[in-house]
Amino acid sequence: MSQPGIKDPDLNSLLSILNDELKELVSKIYADKTEKVIYIEVAKERIMDLAKKLFYLGFDHVKSVSAVDYPREKRLELMVHVGSYLRVVRKYTIVIKSSLDRDNPRVPTLTSVWPSAEFHERETWEMFGVYFENHPDLRRLLLPEEFEGKWPMRKDFRIVTRKAGEAEAPWK
Amino acid sequence: MEVAGSQDITQELSKEMFRAVETGIKEEGERLIELQIGPAHPGSGHMRILAWVDGDVVVRCDPDIGFVHRTIEKLSENRAYIKTIPLVERPSLLDTTPMTIGYVNAVEKLMGVDVPPRAKYLRTILAEITRIASHFYGIGILAIFLGHSTGFMWAFGDREVMIELATMLTGARITYAYAIPGGVRRDMPQSFPDAVEKGLRYIEKRLKDWEKIFLNNPVVERRLRDVGILKPNVARMLGVTGPNVRASGIDYDVRMVEPYEAYDEIDFMIPVAEEGDSYARGLIRFKEIEQSINIIRQAIKKIPDGEIISPQISRLFNPLMKKIYAEQRRVKLPSLMATLKPPKGEAMARVEAGRGEALFHVVSDGSTNPYRFRFVTPSFRNVILFKYLIPGHRVADIPAIYGSLDYFPPEADR
Amino acid sequence: MERGVVFIGEIDVFVKKLIRSLLEKRPVRDIMEWAISYSLWPVHLMTSCCGVELAGAYSPRYDLERYGSLPFVSPRQTNLIIVEGTLTLKMARVARITWEQMADPKFVIAMGACANDGGLFWNSYNVVRANEVIPVDVYIPGCPPRPEGLARAILMLQDKIRSVGVSREDIEILKKYVKKQV
């Protein structure tokens, strides 16, 4: 049985450390008003450097990789939640946001820095169409292989409708 | 500021993990048989495990999930905010309350609504009751995978005690939808504290019988000790969560790290084991039941009087609803909740469900439906263990490892 | 000269017709239906979240084994499928294959709102209705239904077997019904 009782650093010192280390890489760092979430906006080409620097600072696993679709602005925004198991920084979650081109979204894979992102990236590939370069095993995760249509979570996905009673055998 | 480790450590770890997978395929290509342990199997879990075996030893393992993919994230984009509460409950049907608490916390952060203390304590009590029920389900499934059908029957019988308590508080057996933005829906009845005390004493007595029949059982020990060892470094790299990571030596629990609801006013401990094998994962669940009993007792003693729904919402009630609230302490949902329009922005909330850490991220654009709702469940983060933990063991160890991970497929597929 | 008996005609066909006509006669048919109705064994095919209430129904508090039903492992040795919960596209194929592997006479119970008509997830891109895949005998409403509801469904199915019956003609009608859906 153990009980953690270590004092954590407060938000301002963490923000200043992040600002010093990542000044050249990112475009914006700001914190949420509940003071436990830090948002970082970065350009697509700098994601790998940012990931390596965050790994050195102690953020060692990925909680979620996903995307948000903005069809009117013609971009997909990649959203990565990163956390840590180390006592000092485990209170904070960092959200990395990066804009991708909607017609051809390609990003280098994060599994070389964070192996925990493997299954999350597979899900983002089949739901949004974001291609992760050099991923060890990029294929469908949740949908069946004979699924009709592409990229279900995008805003312009049309559901194939069938009338009741005239169903095609759905298992074929 | 601690420096975690260099890039070389990650590369070495990944190489080690991937090497076991690669060499098996290339060297003994013709000797491998592919086994499909399909969705209709004696363990009755709706996922498929593809295992490539060389004789009796598993060389590579691939989880095939998606049999219960019910597209909750897409459905929530077409419904009002409050209609997502039952949707979020359905994936992990065993511990429903932490999931609803997480989603409601995220919406409350968006709206800027404060929750009164009595509502926080009521939510905490119900969350711990469902946590005990969920751990009993996990223990029962582990028992039936090993063939211990008495353990299965005992676990489900003891689970009914907790379900009865929840029925007394909310009116439903499993799916409550108890928490709404601003508070809870019902107050607790007068006879509730005595009933809780009776139930908890029964569970404590039963835990002693469980030790004799399950934890000290020589067959169970032989099957579970030193099977599926998860080292702490590998658990950190793979992002494993819940009792699985606490059985490997890392004491990470969201209730201590980022306290939500009433957890910062109650003191409890986090059980941690060092070995990391399947036996430790089963043992941690028993210890967590004891801690939950402790939390419920403290919460029932410390619960303050007061409102159960925030005044920012209750001042918008019409006179009939105010009368029902004053007499019966029950909230009839006002119609404004169906057309709730939080301001533009985004909010994130984390909770500790029975199986680990769940994450909720809501992006709103000012209309009645959420623009994007991202929802990661603990079982989805644990799927990666099938790929990296099972190779190297025998085929008969697959149910032992699978049962000890407490993986619930509807939760992972959402 | 030895006396012997000569049979005219094929003996297997004759015996099969004799057995079939005996099975439809009153005492044998009643015994057969009584036996089937008290041994409805569901197969371990958990489709979705109502499986929690199914497991709870076979637990000590609501013991359904006293009605004769025992969840068993293999589809070849059982005669009931309980579709609990939502059927997705991937799972529909599995349910269909399992149903085809079971021996006649077999029955299906659709449990929960999602199996009846979609339930909470009615407009999702991945959900199918249970009666488009396999023919259903009894529907249970609820989300999830209480274990007493499942007990009532098994009793209703027993009444149906003993009143309507599972003769050869019923099985032919079932087969034609399923073919029409396809």
Image (tube, rainbow, N blue to C red):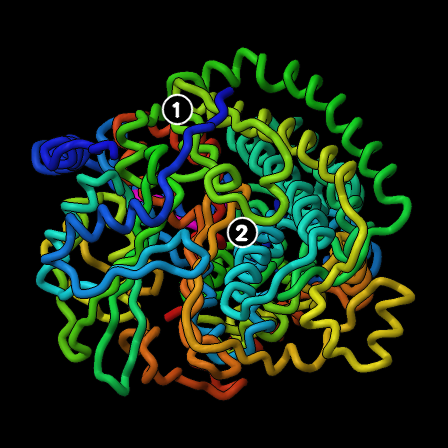
Do labels 1 and 2 touch, CB within 8 Å?
Answer: no
Residue A129: percent from left, percent from top: 22, 70
Chain bearing mark 2: C
Residue in the picture at 22% in, 59% down? A139
**Do the dots labelled 1 and 2 sit on one chain?**
no
Specify start and end residues of the magenta stretch as a single range. Answer: B45-50
Tell me if residue B47 is in the magenta stretch. yes
Q: Quadrant of residue C167?
A: bottom right
Residue in the picture at 72% in, 63% down? B309
The residue nearer to you, when weighing C30 against A62, is: A62
- Mark 2 belongs to which amino acid? Leu
Residue in the picture at 57% in, 62% down? B104
**Quarter that holds the C terminus of chain A:** bottom left
The residue nearer to you, when weighing C134 against B383, is: B383
Position of C62 compared to A70: left or right? Answer: right
Mark on residue B249?
A: 1
Position of B288 compared to C28: left or right? Answer: left
Task: Identify whether A62 is placed above or below A105.
Answer: above
Q: Give the Cα separation between the discs numbered 1 and 2.
A: 36 Å
Residue B205: percent from left, percent from top: 76, 21
Which residue in the structure is indicated by mark 2? C45
Chain bearing mark 1: B
Mark on residue B381?
A: none
Judged from the image, the secondary structure of the residue bearing numbered disc 2 is: loop
- Mark 1 belongs to which amino acid? Gly
Query: Which one is in front in this view, the residue at disc 1 or the one at disc 2?
Result: 1
Tell me if residue C51 is in the magenta stretch. no
Residue in the picture at 48% in, 63% down? C96
